Amino acid sequence: MDIGGLTKAGALLVGLCGVSLAAGSDVALRWKLEKGQRLGYEFTQRNAIEVELENQEIKSSTTLQFGLIWDVESVEADGSARLKQTVDYVRVEVESGMQEPLVYDSRQGGDPPGPLAPLKALYASVTAAPYELTLDARGQVRDVKVPEDVIRAAQGSPAAMLADGGSLLSAKGVERLLAQVIPPLPEGSASQGATWDLKLELPAGPLQMAITNTYSLDQATTPEALVTAQIDTAIKPASGSPLEVEVSKQSGTGRYRFEVEKGRLRDTDVTQDIRLILKVMGREIPQHFVIQAALRYRDDLK
């Protein structure tokens, strides 16, 4: 989760948009990046929250959007690619229902509105210098190198306590952020109906989230395959936190389109819906979170 941390569409019309593989046929889903290749994605995440406090319902939301550009520096024999990652813009919108939305967009220049003022220096560092990371053939991110200016800016920011839960502000944060929207592909060839799992531990300030994604290969086709996911979330207090948490209801889904022949993710949509009761100092505070995340391939890059 960035300034806060996470649906995860489309069916092909066989004969019109793709060629269906025979029932039971295996397909090898792998990223196929090449040295010198450039590709990009737009990431969007909206966190909406409703809180019941003293017989009042308070609603707010934060939407984070940024553009990613990946330049492939090298590719190993196993398909692992070393990438230079550039964040070319960042946009943040905060809605509270009691005033006009507050918006910061790095592409527009100028100073953000008052409450968002600290974001200018933070995201100026994010867009100023490239990151480095490795993306393996299964879509797993490792060996992230974050620019020193970003690390220094994050240390002085309120977002520091959330950085490792999924953000652009730390190496662990980048890994966990991308893991929420880039599915790990099956270890070997898989046929329609195949399933596999991924477990993520996400620190969220005074809370700890444990997310289990159960993936299914719903459509094994060329040129696109469809992966879906069921997402289960458990939440507990972080070590030493005075809070108690009771999750009353939670659910989550993900949909991922993967271009088989091109060897790249086309798009992702993820949604999590969580209802919980936060207990602190003898008070019970009901809360409802809806987290929507999307990743879209950018056709505008050359």
Image (tube, helix red, strand yellow):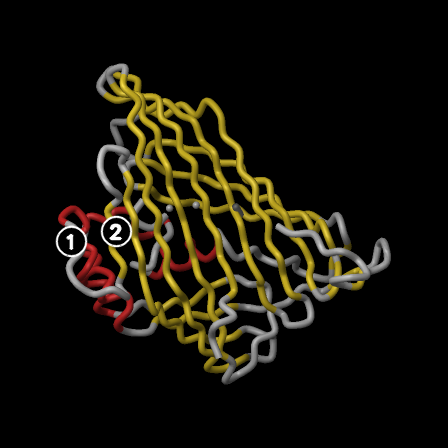
**Residue at position x 31%, y 31% from top?**
59
Can you tell which quarter of the image residue 58 is in? top left
Residue identifier under label 1: 117
The reply, left or right, for residue 217 in relation to residue 94 is: right
Which amino acid type corresponds to the residue marked 2 in the rendered image? Val
Q: Residue at the spot x=69%, y=62% of the render? A: 224
Please state which amino acid type lies under the numbered disc 1. Answer: Ala
Q: CA distance from mark 2 to mark 1?
A: 10 Å
Estimate the x, y position of residue 170 in percent, counting from the top left. Answer: 31, 59
> Mark 2 highlights which residue?
103
| Callout 1 crowding tier (Cα within 10 Å): few <14, some 14–19, many ≥20 | few
Q: Secondary structure at mark 2?
A: strand
Q: Is residue 249 left or right of residue 59?
A: right
Mark 2: few/some/many CA within 10 Å (<14, 14-19, 20+): some
Q: Which residue is located at x 55 percent, y 58 percent?
A: 267
In front here: 31 or 208? 31
Outermost residue, bottom side:
36
